[in-house]
Amino acid sequence: MNVEAFSGQSGGGEGPIETDAVIIGAGPVGLFAVFELGLVDIKAHVVDILDKPGGQCAELYPEKPIYDIPALPVVSGQELTDRLLQQIKPFGATLHLGERIDELERLAEERFRLKTDAGKEFVCKIVVVAAGGGSFTPKRPPLQGIEGFEGTSVHYSVRRMENFKDRDILIVGGGDSALDWTLSLQPFAKSLTLLHRRDEFRGAPHSVEKMRELVGQGAMRLLIGQVTKLHGADGQLEAVTVKTKEGEEHVPIDVMLPFFGLTMKLGPVADWGLNLNENVIPVDTEKFETSEKGIFAIGDINWYPGKLKLILSGFHEAALMAQQAYKYVYPGKKLLFQYTTSSSSLKKKLGVA
């Protein structure tokens, strides 16, 4: 499996990426769709706005126990993600992370063109929307003038760690994302400061411990307080004012990464001409196809009578979606239904023959 988490490849000038399927969303249901499509020889690329796979499971509750996954009495969001990534490994899907599909158009010959906010283009035969409740949008800190620095010196995700090499970085937040990126970027940074409003963290205990070790070694700085003002010009930060218990402090920086959590919005999907029902996408229960032929919706993003927003429901939807997708990718070719327990050809695909 190829994960382009920090590749920053634009695709511009190199022509579009041609593939059988594009899956929008790398949460558990989107990842399992790779598996079901792979079983019927459909190659997929997966695009997600988050900087790592797993969707809500990995981003919002990586260590929260989940109790209703079949055969797994208890599993954390991160462990479920890791298991799914291992399961789909034989099918070689490429994950394009930190990107959002902004444009979708139907081409001739029953194909689609999709374009991300980074300029990367895809041409495919089917589209699978597995975007959960919609696209995740980072929460913007309530700081005057922050919009003028976004995309140049204020970033809500990391696409290429190399872009932060030898920079004076301020990371703001106290959850897993803030701690993970603190530990990942510290070796690249000229200086790194982690700022949180209190000296307690919501992130994984081992990450907190490692962060405090770096602080103790003088390899980074921990500040307790809040940013109250940004200083800079022409999109480039020069410093921030931080209010602490001791008073105000002027902190020189040139990059700020605020991790204040995420909000969920339907996003560009709303502009693709699909029939919508209260910000979800109605589908049939035979193949989970939308009002547009060749565009499917599975997981929490879809709606049908009796819909249950459960991961296991999304897994079932992915299986039926793949059966119909085969007819579009291989028109006129009959699909022979097989079981992984007994089919030698499926076992060969999975590398267990």
Image (tube, helix red, strand yellow):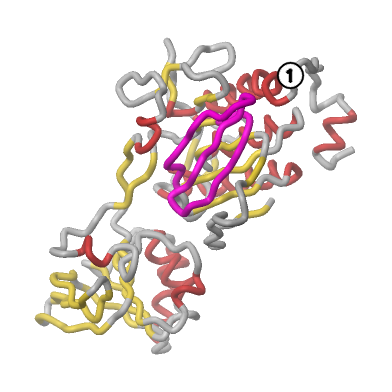
Q: Quadrant of residue 37?
A: top right
Q: Residue tagged by mark 1?
A: 331
Q: Residue 111: within the magenta?
A: yes
101 or 324, which is in the foreground? 101
Q: Is residue 89 left or right of residue 232?
A: right
Q: Is 292 drawn above or below residue 32 in the view shown?
A: above
Residue 148 in the image, given as x and y percentages of width and height: 22, 64
Q: Is residue 111 left or right of residue 303?
A: right
Residue 63 in sight: no
Residue shown at 43% from the left, 67% from the top: 181
141 or 64, which is in the foreground? 141
Q: Which region is colored magenta?
A: 100-127
85 or 23, which is in the foreground? 23
Residue shown at 29% from the left, 81% from the top: 253
Q: Is residue 308 left or right of residue 142?
A: right
Residue 127 in the image, given as x and y percentages of width and height: 56, 31
Q: Residue 285: within the magenta?
A: no
Q: Quadrant of residue 301?
A: top left
Q: Quadrant of residue 74?
A: top right
Instruction: Please tell me whether the stretch drawn in magenta is mainly helix, strand or loop.
Output: strand
Residue shown at 18% from the left, 73% from the top: 230
Quadrant of the snapshot with the C terminus: top right
Q: Secondary structure at mark 1?
A: loop
Residue 187 in sight: yes
Residue reaching furthest to the left:
247
Q: Is 52 drawn above or below residue 327 in the view shown?
A: below
Residue 295 in the image, given as x and y percentages of width and height: 53, 25
Residue 259 in the image, given as x and y percentages of width and height: 32, 60
267 or 312, which is in the foreground? 267
Residue shown at 32% from the left, 38% from the top: 265
